[in-house]
Amino acid sequence: MDIEKLIADATEHIGQNYFQLPIDGQEDPVYRERVYCYELYHQLRSRWPVNTKYELSGEVDKSGHPLIRGNKLDRVKPDLLVHIPGDMEGNHTIIEVKPITANRDGIAKDLSTLTAFRRHAGYKKAIYLFYGRGDIESVLAMAYELQSQDREDMIDINLIEFWWHKRIGIPAIRVVNNA
């Protein structure tokens, strides 16, 4: 399954009101992660291959999962999972999504979650998808900084693919930090 192609195609078709939500009484629309994620889920599902054993799931609550306790996996709800439900050998991709304007604490939490799913839950790929206009290089630099300050070794950005959906009408792309 080509998850990268699916993500690129799906993100290219996310409309303006899902990218930034208009608010009555407010001049500028705002980034709303959940609105974007639900539309991304819809766009992915509408393109999902019928001949695959993998399923796309949104916000699967891992609380109380008998095989993945501790290791930063308790009480987390990843934005999207590509997996074979009920089969730990079928863990394919975890996806976390954040607007480009996300705060440091939210990014640190997601980096820790993505790392934990790669290390302890057998996921083969972790994708961190940022969306919106801004400075992706600053976000990547923050990720490196968070990793270097992480005394508990909970963040490993080498296990994570960073993607950026800069604006509507174009696909998200994988980005590489040049720092």
Image (cartoon, helix red, strand yellow):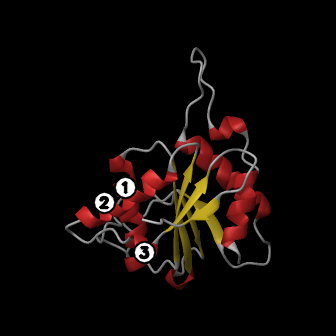
Q: Regarding mark 3 in the picture, which secondary structure is present there?
A: helix
Which residue is label 2 attached to?
146
Marked residue nearer the N-terminal end (1 or 3): 1
Q: Regarding mark 1 in the picture, which secondary structure is present there?
A: helix
User: Which quadrant of the rendered structure holds the C terminus?
Assistant: bottom left
Marked residue nearer the N-terminal end (3 or 2): 2
- Residue type for callout 1: Met
Which residue is label 1 attached to?
142
- Residue type for callout 2: Leu
Q: Regarding mark 2 in the picture, which secondary structure is present there?
A: helix
Answer whether residue 76 is visible to the viewer in this image.
no
Residue 153 horizontal side relative to residue 65, left or right = left
Disc 1 and disc 2 in contact, CB within 8 angstroms: yes
Residue farthest to the left, as pictured? 151
Which residue is label 3 attached to?
158
Q: CA distance from mark 3 to mark 2?
A: 13 Å
Residue 93: where, in percent of width, then height? 56, 72
Q: Nearer the viewer, residue 85 or 135?
A: 135
- Residue type for callout 3: Asn
Disc 3 and disc 2 in contact, CB within 8 angstroms: no
Q: Quadrant of residue 61?
A: bottom left
Q: Is residue 126 above or below residue 16?
A: below
Answer whether residue 52 is visible to the viewer in this image.
yes
Q: Is residue 83 above or below residue 144?
A: below
Say which mark, if any, is on residue 124.
Answer: none
Residue farthest to the front, as pictured? 179
Residue farthest to the bottom, as pictured? 89
| Disc 3 residue crowd, few under 14, some 14–19, many 20+, Cα 10 Å | few
User: Which quadrant of the rendered structure holds the N terminus?
Assistant: bottom right
Residue under the point 55% across and 37% down: 31
Residue under the point 31% across and 60% down: 145
